[in-house]
Image (cartoon, rainbow, N blue to C red):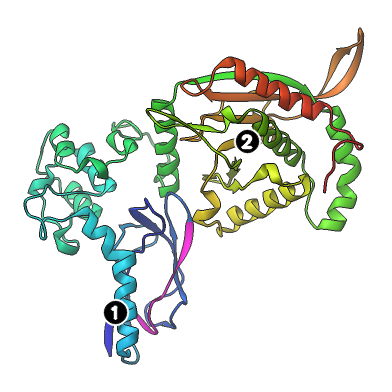
Amino acid sequence: MAMELMKMPQLGESVTEGTISKWLVKPGDHVTKYDPLAEVMTDKVNAEVPSSFTGIIKELKADENQTLAVGEVICSIEVETAKTDNENAEQVSHNEEKVDAPVIRDVQQAAEPSRKARYSPAVLKLSQEHGIDLSKVKGTGNEGRITRKDLLKLVESGNLPKADVPSAISDAAPEEIAPQDNRQTSPVTNVPTAAGDKEIPVTGIRKAIASNMLKSKHEIPHAWTMVEVDASNMVKLRDNLKSDFKQKEGYNLTYFAFFVKAVAQALTEFPELNSMWAGEKIVQKKEINISIAVATEDALFVPVIKNADEKSIKGIAREIQELASKVKSGKLKAEDMQGGTFTVNNTGSFGSVQSMGIINYPQAAILQVETIVKRPVVINDMIAVRDMVNLCLSLDHRVLDGLVCGRFLARVKEIIEKISKDNTPIY
């Protein structure tokens, strides 16, 4: 019987590592090709890793909650029967495409000794945090590649080949360093602890959130503006329809669907807000793809409603429900979070009445929809109780100015306030 190794796959274009969140097999288990082996969490998505072989699980090479670089071995499988030449060729081709390619791209010292070594973002980050001279580290990965695991072992041993941080950065190929990898997501400091304090390990998802938020705040000059909207007509229409809608469609007609539809409509009239900063140019996106924030107990995901301007309120409500369900069940895929051009965040679901969101990089704006509150307001010199909501806009001041953002918000306000049974189709 042959022994085969399963390696950490690359679960996204820029993904360099993954965390084993849960093993679905144990040593001695029999698996067939394509059976799920483990649940893996990256900074972009949760996914199941399928087996490439049929056989018996011999050894799990990683513990749960352990992070491995792409290409590192996660388990070994004793294959039951010899493969045909075609099957072997297919497997080699698959492994080269999914695993070896990023390794060759990261380190090319053996093939190209004249070129400087290239390191993955995870390795660079650790070396910069601990002042490690990477030229003095012997890697254990493919082609002598230095892995994150190699550096963690050095850190634990305390035997660190020291170097200045600028040297570690200059030795790396510039195209391999993403902007967020040149800075730490948080200061490396010794926080004093006392009896009863609880230390909570930072998960891969939490690290990704921290990195993206820090990048957004460092690179984007944020500005904020807010409007107050009378949502009474919208509330009345939705409340009148919600029971029949739920019975007919099987999911809820939420207030949030009305807001997303209004934003998508306003973006067709003010496409400047559907833009991204690109250094020497501003890219105004053709498609209107609305990112929505969906939270779990310990993480935040931002799935995307594609071509939201072409969808009805019913269609948007369905996508909100489906995407939220995927997040909570851990079935959200990488493609579900790609292509967003503008973000709408339902902060009102937590009772918030005013907030200043951090822009979802590299987008140019994010709109916070706050909670709907009954308040007394003056209408035609008379006091009336109305359903009021604040809409808070964070904007990238490199791309957008107050004038266009003010007009955009005024248009969203107008759409919401004019909602009625006669002029607002749900289907």
Q: Position of residue 418 (x, y in %)?
A: 84, 28
Q: Is residue 232 above or below residue 174?
A: above
Which quadrant of the structure image shows residue 64?
A: bottom left
Disc 2 designates what residue? Answer: 344
Residue 72 seen:
no
Looking at the rendered structure, the kind of residue marked 1 is Glu
User: Could you say which is closer to the camera, residue 354 or residue 96?
Assistant: 96
Which is nearer the eye, 255 or 98? 98
Give the magenta-colored segment's residue range. 46-57
Answer with left or right where residue 207 lies relative to residue 413.
Answer: left
Q: Secondary structure at mark 1?
A: strand
> What percent of the width, then of the height, locates residue 75?
32, 72
Name the residue carrying label 1. 4
Question: Could you tell me how far apart the alpha carbons at marks 2 and 1 are, in whole angstroms?
Answer: 46 Å
Q: In the displayed structure, would residue 178 be above or below residue 322?
A: above
Helix, strand, or loop for circle 2? Answer: strand
In the image, what residue occupies the spot 34% across and 72% down? Answer: 94
Q: Sequence order check: which comes first, mark 2 or mark 1? A: 1
